[in-house]
Amino acid sequence: MPPDLNNQYILITGAGRGLGQHLARHLASCGAVVGVADIDAATTHTTVDELRASGLQAYAYVGDVSEQAVFLRMADEFARIGGRIDAIVNNAMLLHYCPIEQVEDERLTVMLNVGIKAVFWSAQALLKHYDKSRGASIINMSSPVAHRGYPNTSAYSAVKGAITTLTKVLGAELGPKGIRVNAVSPASVPTPGALGLNSKEVYEKRAATIPLRRIGTEQDNSNAIAFLLSSEASFVNGEIFNVDGGASSAG
Ligand SMILES: NC(=O)c1ccc[n+]([C@@H]2O[C@H](COP(=O)([O-])OP(=O)(O)OC[C@H]3O[C@@H](n4cnc5c(N)ncnc54)[C@H](O)[C@@H]3O)[C@@H](O)[C@H]2O)c1
């Protein structure tokens, strides 16, 4: 049975497509009221329209979550709906791999800003809008690249490494205030963004190297996040939750 997230107000960044979009549908199906935040206006509105057409509760927020003022404005608007925010999922990212000599200042800045700065703004937004008597939760998106050295992933891995550390720091800092901070580390889900990094064939071949002999799905990721957001995970904090079929723990 999926976790009961009834009456939880959850803001999801980068929810216009890929893992974030699937997550928005899944959490809303578990009873949550979801805020769909994305820099892409078209996919944001399409996602919200589709969720509403299915009878689910969703609201659209278009903007760049790396900008503090934008993030906090979105959170202010979302908080007006239910009077609070119960959770924020920091999912937005620009997925890009290249050799170190091809790293460009402009793109590196965007990647660092979207991946890392947004985590800071999410904590500030939640501190402003959470209900102290209920507690709250932040979920960050880590990655296997944060734990091992994969060539040609320097910018992306730097972001995911920072996110992994921030998850532990904020888990320790915000835990006493009743805010749990966790991360999931999914692997090999061929989303639109991930297919810009590796071809479909690469993902299919990768299945043979994963102990469970398949690649991950959006549903695997959404299930793990729904659990971490639920009351069943009420003592889980500062955790990096691998959702990778055992790939990162295998020898
Ligand atoms: N797909 C995988 O296998 C995988 C594995 C590990 C981690 N992740 C992480 O999961 C998250 C989602 O990845 P995905 O594969 O769905 O990628 P995706 O590229 O398909 O989706 C990313 C979404 O983020 C949005 N976005 C980008 N910059 C933004 C900004 N500045 N403000 C607001 N929205 C912005 C994009 O418009 C897009 O809708 C990312 O953090 C990614 O690093 C993915």
Image: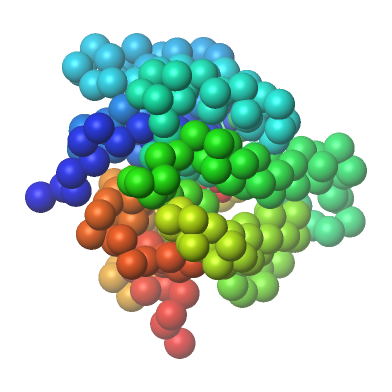
Q: Is residue 5 above or below residue 21?
A: below
Q: Say whether residue 95 is visible.
A: no
Q: Is residue 212 left or right of residue 71?
A: left
Task: Give the x, y percent position of residue 49.
Answer: 34, 12
Q: Residue at x 25, y 54 (%)?
A: 231
Residue 113 picture quarter: top right
Q: Residue at x 41, y 31 (%)?
A: 84
Q: Residue at x 69, y 55 (%)?
A: 159
Closest to the observer: 188 or 200? 188
Task: Give the x, y percent position of residue 114.
Answer: 68, 40
Which quadrant contains ligand 1? top right
| Direction left: furthest residue | 1
Q: Is residue 70 above or below residue 182?
A: above
User: Which quadrant would the C terminus be assigned to in this image?
Assistant: bottom left
Q: Residue at x 51, y 13 (%)?
A: 42
Residue 28 picture quarter: top left
Q: Is residue 177 left or right of residue 229?
A: right
Task: Give the x, y percent position of residue 74.
Answer: 56, 23
